[in-house]
Image: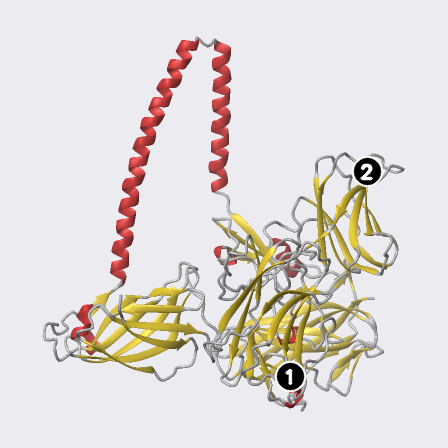
Amino acid sequence: MVYKMNESIIVIQAEATKPNDTNVVFWSHDRGTAKLRMKLVRKNGIPQSLPEGTTVPIRLIFKSATAEGGYGKHDYLATIEDRVNGIVSIVLEDNILGYQGRVDGSIYIDFPNDRSLDTAGRFTFDIKRSPIDDSTPELEDYYFNGFSQTIDKIEKILADGKQEIEQKIAESETQIDAKVKDTNDKITKANQDVATLYTNIDKANDRIDQTNQQISDLGKLKKMYSNSIDFGGYDYSGRANLAPNLDFSKFSGNATTMTKPLACFKDHETYLELDSSDPSAVNTSRNIYVPNCSALLPNNTYIMTVPIMINADFDGFRTSFILKTSDGTALGTINPPRENVGTWQNVTKVFTVPGNLKFDTTYLQLWQPKEGNGKLYIGYDIKIEKVNSTSDTATPYQPNLLEDPYWLGKIPLGENITDPAGIISSSYMLLSKQLKEKIIENQTYTITLKGTKPATQAFRCFVEYESGTSAVNLLDMKPVEGLTDEWQLTFKATRTAKGINGNILVYQVPNTSLGQCKIDWFKLEKGDTRTPNISQFKYFGEGLKDSNDPNDYSWDITPEYTEKGLNDSVSLTEPETVLGLKNFEDGLQVGGKEVATITDLDKTAITTVNNKDGEIADFNLNGAVFGFGSEIKTTGTKAAFIRNSDKKLVCQIAGTYIFNGQLSVQVRTTVDAWHYVDMRVNGRNAGAPWARGVQSFKNRWNFSGVVQVSLKVGDVIDFVSSSSETGATTGQFISCPLAVFQRIGD
């Protein structure tokens, strides 16, 4: 089919922009051939993927003296030509070609999870009358709804489907009647006795019970668990991502340790720029790495997808983006594309891991020879997915949901039925773990540990069912794909422990090449599925179908997390965030007894952006660090805190403290987003966010929260803010009416 076609790029953004003048002129004689083709991209230029089930409505409006409001409307449902790269098109209906003049268009996206957006993409084109064409009537129908065509098709499909189902039912009933008659004839002919008849009846009842159970199972909601429900607008219809979730902080100048990269590598929030004109790139090859990525399994096939863009000056086509094993062996290599300069492209590489390789980790490397010129851009949305064969194709990007902050799973957390403590050792036997309960015959168990070892060695597990007898070899642990330095093994107990609960032993093998091993933690749980080594899931989702897409579930806070955050007592054994302000007017209690408060802190918090006490200071909501105002009061004989020259608190009396604080902040631009404040001890977060706030009115946020933390003498305390709005604008403090530390125990 021949089309007169226009191609435009539509940028999805919040800012209102001038409509895109396509300079396109269609003529009245372009019947069935006037085609508008558009590529939808995000603000950073990366293509907007369109998952299965997504629709893209397009509205065209034009002046009409007879239409209500003086404007006519034509609504189209665009054809999605390329879901991965966001390319859609429409062909103009014949009746709109009777209009002469300027036409304005707008594009919308309706996702399958009931979310939708106005792309803010506006465009214009013109329609004129062909000199040869006086047969096209002037436009009279000022409203055309393209959706009705789709609805008619759907209704026809439903009608045809209903007719086919009714026909199948009729055929099935005929077959069933025939089989029933045949069975009765056989029963009569065989002259079965009463016992045989009862046996058949029992079998039929068993089948009925099984059918009823299957029907009952259909009504049960499927569940999913996660520690974060910020899943973003990604397409989860494809395979899981085994690559790490990236930002610039994950990149290094070294393949094994974290060092500062060359200055020619520049961060742009969602992508990395390699600028070969930077002084740091002169007469040297340029390398940047993502060290310590997940191991992949031998004899398995994977696809790596990397978003890449080059500028017009780029000539370094030997430049390589490489996935390597810990010893430097290349598994998959991607080179920049030579075509489509200035356009983001998802470049893929299919590779199979050789069966003879031994490696515990992988790393990503971007390398460019010193003679390379121009600029190269690498998007952070890198994906590694496991496939069945080299003929499989890549699926759209989604974040790695196995790692922090998600720890996604489909079953509740399994209880660790042994001591979790790890070890650093070069011995042959690394661990001997006693079970908290007796090991039972035919029960399935899963072992998980986080640890490192020499590449020549393997973690091998054994089980002891009885003292004084030989331990049973459970073979070697395998790496957990998608997680770094985690290993797992599942086994079924062959007998019940006798005289003891049972022991699990971990060795490093072979014993002829022993090296230093480090095990951070150890977990043994019932069942054949590994669950994360975390204290609790914060959220659970429920859905009607067993799906790997978290957007197919309705999410809520787990009872365990609610209880921990809102109970009447506060844990003294671990950092804990209490959601909401507690009422302590009857006094704080430990074990039912009141305890004294030692230190109060008050007045205005400050920020490193402008270190003047009490001043309303500008700061960026993402990454602003807060100290404390100069007024410190204490109720004890010795101050528990002092303020250092950086206006941060330094602990003077060790103990367990509860911090109770309030903070009001205003930002200059209204954004619907969550904002967080985290307490930090010696530069590390003390636990879950101390406080969080969502827009309450206009653009003002009020933060309040309570957090418990154990402190040592010399510990330095400050706070840092963050936002779910990556482009959050400059903010200002309004007030800090409360900032109180209370010591509740040693």
The image quarter containing residue 516 is: bottom right
Count of labels in the image: 2
Q: Looking at the image, which is closer to me, 612 or 634?
A: 612
Say if residue 172 shows up in the picture. Answer: yes
Question: Could you say which quadrant of the image residue 572 lies in?
Answer: bottom right
Left-right relation of 282 to 428: left
What is the image's colouring?
A: secondary structure
Asked which secondary structure carries label 1, the reply is loop
Helix, strand or loop status at disc 2: loop
* Residue that lies at the very extreme toward the right in this rendered image: 468
- Say which quadrant the N terminus sits in: bottom left
Residue 12, relative to residue 630: is it above or below? Answer: above
Location of mark 1 (residue): 370
Residue at 31% x, 31% y: name it.
Answer: 171
Q: Give percent across and percent down for residue 607.
A: 66, 85
Residue highlighted by disc 2 = 465
Check disc 1 and give the amino acid type: Lys
Residue plotted at (74% across, 73% down): 257
Viewport quadrant of the C terminus: bottom right
Pinpoint residue 422: horizontal percent, then vertical percent.
81, 57
